[in-house]
Image (cartoon, rainbow, N blue to C red):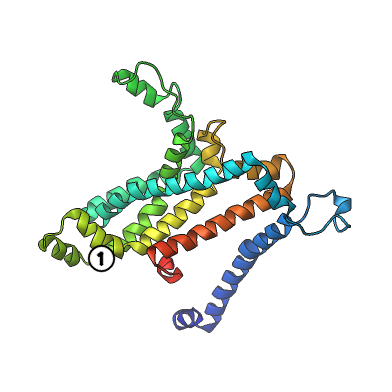
Amino acid sequence: MFKQLKSRFGGGLAMGILSIIGVWLIALVILPQLLMVDYSFRPNLLPDEIGGEKDSYSLVNYETLFANKIHLTIFLKTIWSSVLVTLLTLCVSYPLAFYLAKVATPGQAALCILLLIIPFWINEILRTFSWYIILAYKGPLNSLLLALGLIDRPMRFMTGDGAVMLGMVYAYILFMIFPIYNAIENLDMNQIKAARSLGAGWIRTHYRIIIPHAKPGIATGCIMTFMLAAGSYAVPALLGSPGSRWFTQIIYNWFFEGGNWNQGAAYAFLLLLICIGFIGLVMRIFKVGLGDIAR
């Protein structure tokens, strides 16, 4: 990397760029994570007890999760729901990405991309509030369904995890579309035409030609979507019902309501480990490396 930067910007500027990147990684990524790990193995103590006999490393904070059946259930549900959000987002994004990359004209693709990006100029919380209004008991969706005669009385959409998943698919769809779009765009159209000329249907063409070529983009989109969904707080807090809590809400409660940063750090670190494990699993399934994902 240094050689590439040096050949383009010169030795001094290249060293400056790498130094800034290094400071950013250490100060904003590595040190906070190390501090979180350190907190997670220590007990929650009063200020005058820190450094004393009770201040020792243990697994008590981690054991709390497995001893608390409610928290463990929410943890497992969050992971499973995040996987579902990832799969739903992939199912929605892949056709759109293929249309933008290989079917739409440059003008149509530019217009569609603009329409996809414009809503994301607004804060995520405000976009989530818009779904809250749409899905409300007396909201526009219920009014439309009543006007069309499809339902007899308003429905409660924000029960269970359905509204949360819908909000997350909408919130993170761009993180799935653009990696897949970039991967498919580089595919030579002659390969698709050759497959079609040899008698392959569209399903077989996608399965044998397009999807294998788009594997790095699909893997990147799945990783980003899963991590954003698993770590989301605003969407489940606004669209979720009392019975559809997300694990991040429990972490938030430990930090800011319970005042137990050590327990919250343990929960957060476990969630981080699951996300890292998911990255490894996706890379293994799609048979891609970090270099393929980073492109």
In this rendered view, identify the residue nearer to me: 250 or 5: 250
Rate crowding at label 1 as few (under 14), some (14 to 19) or many (20 or more) other CA atoms within 10 Å.
some
Residue 122 spot, x, y in % from top left: 46, 43
| Residue sitting at x 70%, y 50% | 63
| Helix, strand or loop under label 1 | loop
**Foreground of the two, 221 or 10:** 221
Placement of 176 over or under 70, stated as above or below: below
Task: Using the rendered view, name the quadrant where residue 189 is placed.
Answer: bottom left
268 sits left or right of 78 in the view: right
Tell me: 109 left or right of 253.
Answer: left
Residue 232: x %, y % from top left:
53, 46
**In the drawing, does residue 4 fall left or right of residue 148?**
right
- Residue assigned mark 1: 187
* Picture residue at 58% right of the left edge, 45% below the top: 75
User: Residue 285 in the image: x percent, y percent?
Assistant: 40, 62
Residue 105 visible from this viewpoint: no
| Horizontal side, residue 284 vs residue 275: left or right | left
Check disc 1 and give the amino acid type: Leu
Q: Taking 159 as reference, is 11 above or below it?
A: below
Residue at horizontal 89 percent and vertical 51 percent from the top = 48
For residue 292, say whether it is visible: yes
* Nearest the eye: 78 or 150: 78
Looking at the image, how many numbered discs can be counted on the residues? 1
Q: Position of residue 50 (x, y in %)?
A: 85, 55
- Residue shown at 45% from the left, 57% from the top: 223
Compared to residue 128, the image places residue 197 above or below, namely below
* Image quarter (top left, top right, bottom left or bottom right) of the C terminus: bottom left
